[in-house]
Image (cartoon, rainbow, N blue to C red):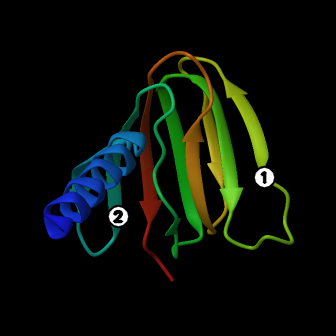
Amino acid sequence: MKIIFIAIILLVFSASNIAGEVRGKKEILLNNSDVEVVRLTYPAGAESGMHTHKHPNRVVYFVKGGKLALIPKDKQQQAKSINVSDGKTIFLPATTHNVKNIGDTEIVIVETEIKGN
């Protein structure tokens, strides 16, 4: 009986933890030796999870803009909040960070990374 109770408690905590994680969707549009192009969709509250951009040339086009937090891995650096309108294009340097949609609307991004030297 004790084992069943513990199993139920673990299941409840696991389910609540999984339900709390909202991840964005990543769709690879093109990936070869020269370039990677991805479409990223972030519903309100969704995040990318910590990840690294190792290629220095990265352009981000906002199909649907919104409010994002760019959270660096390095805790010494401050998180940056940006509010981007539909159709805007920005350049971002290589980094390790988490991206989180902190607005109320879905954000859709097409990101291009040039893999050159």
* Quarter of the image where the N terminus is located: bottom left
Sort mark 2 into few (<14), some (14-19) or many (20+) by Cα contacts within 10 Å: some
Q: CA distance from mark 1 to mark 2?
A: 28 Å
- The mark that comes first in sequence, 1 or 2, is 2
Residue 32 sits in which quadrant?
bottom left
Amino acid at pointer 2: Val
Say which residue appears at 52% left-offset and 73% top-offset. 55
Pick the residue in front: 15 or 12: 12
Front: mark 1 or 2: 1
In the rendered image, the vertical position of residue 62 relative to residue 46, given as above or below: above
Residue 99 lies left or right of residue 11; in this view the side is right
Residue 12 lies left or right of residue 80; in this view the side is left
Q: Do residues under tags 1 and 2 come within 8 Å of each other at their CB atoms?
A: no
Say which residue appears at 49% left-offset and 25% top-offset. 44
In the rendered image, the vertical position of residue 65 relative to residue 109, given as above or below: above
Which x, y percent locates residue 26?
30, 47
Secondary structure of residue under mark 2: strand
Single out the residue that lies furthest toward the front: 1
Say which residue appears at 44% left-offset and 35% top-offset. 109
Residue 21's tag is none
Amino acid at pointer 1: Ala
Residue 59 lies left or right of residue 46; in this view the side is right
Which x, y percent locates residue 77?
84, 66
Say which residue appears at 20% left-offset and 67% top-offset. 2
Look at mark 1 in the image and give the residue it sits on: 79
Secondary structure of residue under mark 1: loop
Single out the residue that lies furthest toward the bottom: 117
Which x, y percent locates residue 59?
54, 49
Look at mark 2 in the image and give the residue it sits on: 35
Pick the residue in front: 39 or 22: 22
